[in-house]
Amino acid sequence: MVAVMLMVVVGGATRLTHSGLSMAQWKPLHVLPPITQQAWDDEFGLYQQTPEYKHVNKGMSLSEFKCIYWWEYGHRLLGRIVGILVLLPLFFLFKDIPNWLRGRIAIVFSLGGAQGVIGWWMVKSGLKIDPTVSHIRLCVHLVMAFIILSVLARALWKFEGKLFKKICLRDATLLVIIGLTIIYGAYVAGLKAGFIYNTFPLMEGQWLPNEWNFYQPIWKNFINNPATVQWLHRLLALITVTYSTILWIKHGSTYRLITIKIIAQVALGISTLLLQVPLAVALLHQAWAMVVWMIALKTVWVKK
């Protein structure tokens, strides 16, 4: 699980450093990076044919290209390492692994393969005329990472002998609200909406940004409008912390830890916004979202 979380963080760094389109080809068996000067020239030549180079980074030097290349290469390499780590128990502990766990390993490995395909599908959206990665595809990529984490977590808790409980309506509601907040966080990231309206709680003096209904039909604003997406992410975060606090007050210490973690996440989100998305704080905000999700799952799934 740690390796998966690290991969998500490196993916976030790849996005924030504008490195995600530096590898213009997808080679699933590509493991070794360019070593010779000719290999680097070939990779750079491929990048120079992309819309991002032509419209955004024209004139970039080879040394500058290497800086963004290593981020994307590292992200893809981590994906392959995670796949190996998932399969290792089957090679060394096959006879001692229960059948249900073998099945779970197969599911996680299959999801990991699908995640690789989704990742390339996401990158391809930025290799066309407009060198911008689709925020919808970015969201799908992130959601799949959270699904993989969830499957791994449940398998680990079951392997440890923990008992599970049926999720009640209030717990399902908590998970849905947290999940929606994460989804809109992905939209904010994909649309670079964190770089606008860097004030809180008002958005440049307004509770609701003036251009919230810029697109027609109006429903498009809730997916494609950076101002509206940022507003919804803020609103969902505040709803999440309010609802979790109510659960803590009404139902006791069961919800104490998750509420504290959510409060910390909201504070990180506000800091990311006010500081105009510094790399370290933004990555911590992304990593903490995974912590919040895992603790929420354990709170509603696992019996004490």
Image: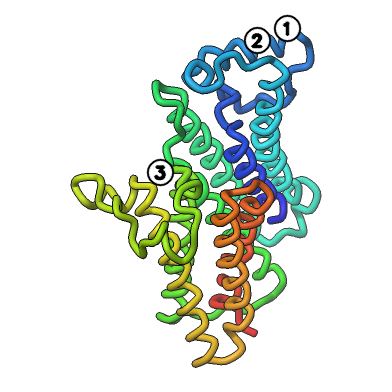
Q: Are marks 2 and 1 in contact (CB under 8 Å)?
A: yes
What element does badge 3 sit on?
helix
Query: Circle 1 sits on which residue?
Result: 38
How was this image coloured? rainbow
Identify the residue at horizontal 40%, vertical 25% (top origin): 130
Instruction: Kindly identify the amino acid type of the residue bearing the numbered disc 2.
Output: Asp
Circle 3 sits on which residue? Answer: 136
Q: Which residue is mark 2?
A: 42
Height in image: 242 above or below 90?
Answer: below
Q: CA distance from mark 2 to mark 1?
A: 6 Å
Secondary structure found at label 1: helix
Q: Is residue 300 left or right of residue 239?
A: right
Is 170 rendered above or below residue 60? below
| Residue that appears at 60% across and 24% down | 23
Q: Is residue 301 above or below residue 237?
A: below
Residue 233 in view (yes/no): yes
Labels 1 and 3: the sequence-earlier one = 1
Residue that extends furthest to the right in the rendered view of this protein = 92
Looking at the image, which residue sits at the far left?
217
Q: CA distance from mark 1 to mark 3?
A: 36 Å
